[in-house]
Amino acid sequence: MPQADLNYSSDLTLNAPAILAAIESTIAAFDGAAGACKGRAHKVAEFHHTHVLIKVSVLEKPHRDTAFMNALAQKLETAIKAHLHAPCAFSLALSFLPNAYITNLHRP
């Protein structure tokens, strides 16, 4: 289950749910076994430069090698930038979750 954190300066008008949905659908189209992507958006009130910072983390799997991660990063960049309509600094970090990471659903 991938994780996506969208951080952006408050002077930008973004459709954060649409961006998070685009991240999820891009990952699903590229890696069908990834599952749902838990996404969160954080509007930053205090900042130095107008920016968007996206951090996406996935579980490490044998098929997710360097070439895979680079290709996914390019696809995510294209998908996310389609939702950005004002100039801003853009950063995207794609990384692996730790080996001891636990992800599941809790149903009391």
Image: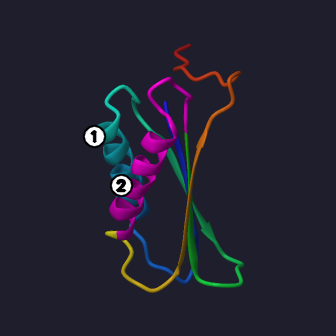
Residues marked 1 and 2 touching at CB (< 8 Å)? yes
Q: Is residue 102 left or right of residue 83?
A: right
Disc 1 versus disc 2: distance between alpha carbons?
Answer: 10 Å
Q: Is residue 63 inside the magenta stretch?
A: yes
State the extent of the magenta-drawn residues as a range.
58-81
Q: Nearer the viewer, residue 70 or 96?
A: 70
Tell me: 65 left or right of 25. Answer: right
Residue with the most extreme front position: 67
Tell whether 78 sits left or right of 39.
left
- Residue 33 falls within the magenta-colored stretch: no
Q: Name the amino acid type tagged 2.
A: Lys
Alpha-carbon neighbours of circle 2 within 10 Å: few (<14), some, or many (≥20)? some
At horizontal 36% and vertical 25% (from top left) the residue drawn is: 33
Q: Which residue is mark 2?
A: 75
Quadrant of the frame with the C terminus? top right
Is residue 17 visible from the viewing direction of this image?
no
Mark 1: few/some/many CA within 10 Å (<14, 14-19, 20+) = few
The residue under the point 41% across, 62% down is: 77
Residue at x-position 70% and y-position 79%: 47
Image: 56 above or below 38: below
Expressed as whole percent of the image width and height from the top left, the position of residue 68 reads 43, 40
Q: Using residue 93 as the reference point, say whether residue 63 is left or right of it.
A: left
For the stretch drawn in magenta, what is the main secondary structure?
helix
Residue 68, placed above or below residue 84: above
Q: Please state which amino acid type lies under the numbered disc 1.
A: Ala
